[in-house]
Amino acid sequence: MEAKKFISKVLPDGHLSLPEETAKEVGKVFEVILVPLQEAEIYSYTEALAKEKNFSQLTEEDIERIIHEVRGIR
């Protein structure tokens, strides 16, 4: 069994947005656990990911900009 973890958003019609790969698995059944994402958590997660990927030279402002760009916020 392979677990998949991703950040999703509840859409206006009540459905969850899914990553493209998962959305193609029509008819497959998943166990879904919803945990609210707190803003502070995304920053610490991104910081840890940046260090893991050797992007530790990024500043907090760089990380914030990346998060906003990914979320479509300018």
Image: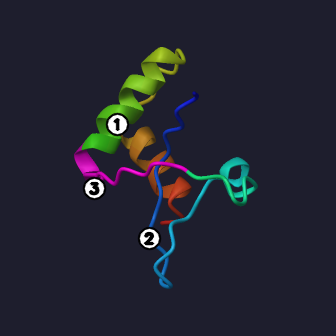
Answer with left or right where residue 41 lies relative to residue 67.
left
Using the numbered discs, state the Cα–Cα distance from disc 3 to disc 2 in whole angstroms: 11 Å
Magenta span includes 47: no
C-alpha distance separating marks 3 and 1: 22 Å
Q: Amino acid at mark 3?
A: Pro
Which residue occupies the foreground of this view, 3 or 49? 3
Q: Is residue 37 above or below residue 61?
A: below
**Which residue position is annotated with label 2?**
10
- Residue drawn at x 52%, y 33% is 3
Residue at the (66%, 52%) spot, across then down: 28
**Residue that carries the numbered disc 1 in the rendered image:** 60
List the single residue furthest toward the right. 24
- Examine the rendering and report whether any part of residue 57 can be seen: no
Q: How is the image coloured?
A: rainbow
Q: Nearer the viewer, residue 56 or 36?
A: 36
Q: Position of residue 49 (x, y in %)?
A: 45, 26
- Name the residue beneath numbered marker 3: 36
Q: In the rendered structure, are the residues bearing label 2 and label 1 in contact, judged by CB atoms less than 8 Å apart?
A: no
Question: Does 62 sit above or below residue 24?
Answer: above
- The answer to whether 64 is drawn above or below residue 44 in the figure is below
* Secondary element type, mark 3: loop
Mark 3 residue crowding within 10 angstroms, few (<14) / some (14–19) / many (20+): few
Quick check: 49 left or right of 28?
left
Separation of marks 2 and 1 at Cα, in angstroms: 27 Å
State the extent of the magenta-drawn residues as a range. Answer: 30-40
